[in-house]
Amino acid sequence: MNENLFMHYRLPGGSRAELHHLFQWHIPEYFNLCSDTVERQAKLHPERLALIEPERRRVTYAELANSASRLSSALQARGFDTGMIVAVWGEPGLELALAHLAVYRLGAILLPLSTLFGKDAVRYRLEHAGARIILVARQILEERESWIEDIVEHRYVLEDVLEWIEATLPQPAHPTRADDPALLIYTSGTTGKPKGALLAHRTLLGHLPGFYLYSNDPAWEAVYWSPAEWAWVGGLFDVVLPAWFYGFTVLAYRGRTFDPEYALWLIEQYGVTHSFLFPTALKILRATGKKPERHRLKSIHSGGEVLGAEMEAWSREVFGLPINEFYGQTEANLLIGNSFVRDPIKPGSMGPAYPGHRVVLMREDGSFAGVGEPGEIALALPDPVAFLGYWNNVEATQEKIKDGWLRTGDLAVRDEDGYFWYMSRADDVINTAGYRLGPHEIESAIMQDEAVSMAAVVGAPDAVRGEKIVAFICLKGSYDERSQDDLENIAHRLRMLVRETVGHHAYPREIIFADDLPLTPTGKLMRTKLKELAEGKGKIY
């Protein structure tokens, strides 16, 4: 138990510049994502609410910690062990919370899966990670029952697992070192299959300065809610885990689709004070033209896409406060961001670097870019927020980390006040509705169709999603020889194929048929050219 950590990461008052000068990392030798969050708060504030499930139940820190301890012991008694990869698949709620906490407490490595994933996405992650055990929600298991048993050997239903708690006594937690691995989250790239980013227990500590600042110095009664899944760093490390570190309340609800009216109802009904809303959710809310009749919001924070001055103005009008935009990625999150109670917001800017992180912009030759000059965002190492490396991929890890710097692959410029302004990805990851997708997975799914000879996927600007997925398809034989009905049927078939194999979030919104695709002299796809073509040219279905 690390008693001094809590006060160390309650940042003092002052400007961002003063905090940068004063702040120092405190990383203990031992740290655990369960013992040093929920269990610590259970000892200090046992009756404080840790979790609320809307219209269902409320759980105190004492109840959550006790159940997590018992479940951890039950898992251990059934062969779950330290260092083992355990896949977890479910919707935000008590069952998923306990699964996470029990696995962390045990010292095992948790592999979170998105509810949007299809067969191929799940198979690849489980096989690549070597995961033989999955804790899965009953509804998800029933929906995928036809194929999931062929992918993973040991399947446990989350709702049934909770029954083990009653018959199990709590046991001491496994003492994990701060650098021990805790999570394996797969992140999409453009040149190959998704890479498994291995995150340590201390990763949470690396998020705390940014979390505290974009939360605008949160008070004890803070209630956090986000529609983000708990399968990504956004849901876990931007909301749930840091909220539990500080002893705040987490409202656990997501829904299969984002319902703006229900979101406003949640904010009003449960007194939400802090909400992480991805840009697409903000755009959907704005499109309704509605505003809450009353609210307690102290902070709205967002990331993953430039919001711009119009969105800031809308938030001020509807909620009475600007949006604290921030920047990060799975491998190194919450590096840059705003805090309007500390520093002025510049609409369109991601903000300055958060305390504790040395962030620079690099030219291609590794030298530092000057003020107003584009460069790749890079993080100086060591830094507690940085990942441990890519699972079973030394080459990719060495490409990501060079000469003591973590290279993000994102381009930005910095102004004279130290504010960063996002430009673009250095690669071709598609950022759609808050999800980062590599084209490879989608292209591989499309290529399974016997009518397709070649496929290429790019992102194109979209007013709601940020980017929409556009697929260029070469058929076996000229598409001009096919009827319009035939092409429409093929397009529908390809969309369904991607939905079923990769996920509901990944299917192409537009499909463009072509006789050939632009290639470089070495045979590589010219994705820049395809992005230009995606803006309205060609036959779209």
Image (cartoon, rainbow, N blue to C red):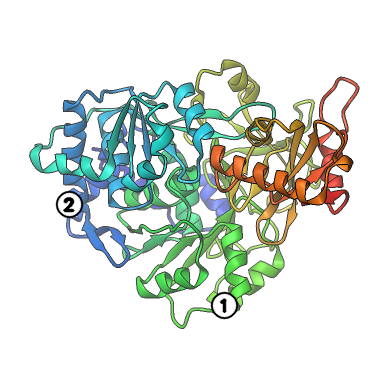
> Which disc, if any, is residue 318?
1
10 Å crowding of disc 1: few (<14), some (14-19), many (20+): some
Q: What residue type is labelled 1?
A: Val
Q: In this view, does 216 lie to the left or right of 406?
A: left
Image height of 488 relative to 173, above or below: below
- Looking at this view, name the residue that lies furthest to the bottom: 293
Q: In this view, does 462 lie to the left or right of 179?
A: right
Q: Position of residue 276 (x, y in %)?
A: 49, 58
In the image, what residue occupies the spot 65% across and 22% down?
A: 399
Q: Earlier in the sequence, mark 2 or mark 1?
A: 2
The residue singled out by tag 2 in the image is 62
Q: Nearer the viewer, residue 55 or 485?
A: 485
Q: Position of residue 75 (x, y in %)?
A: 21, 31
Q: In which quarter of the image is the N terminus?
A: top left
Q: Nearer the viewer, residue 503 or 112?
A: 503
Residue 412 seen in this snapshot: no
Q: Nearer the viewer, residue 498 or 58?
A: 498
Secondary structure of the residue carrying numbered label 2: helix
Residue 73 seen in this snapshot: yes
In the image, what residue occupies the spot 88% across and 50% down?
A: 537
Secondary structure of the residue carrying numbered label 1: helix
Q: What residue type is labelled 2?
A: Ala
Image height of 374 relative to 240, above or below: above
- Looking at this view, name the residue that lies furthest to the right: 521
Q: In this view, does 8 lie to the left or right of 504?
A: left
Q: In this view, does 313 lie to the left or right of 90?
A: right
Q: How far apart are marks 2 and 1 (CA)?
A: 37 Å
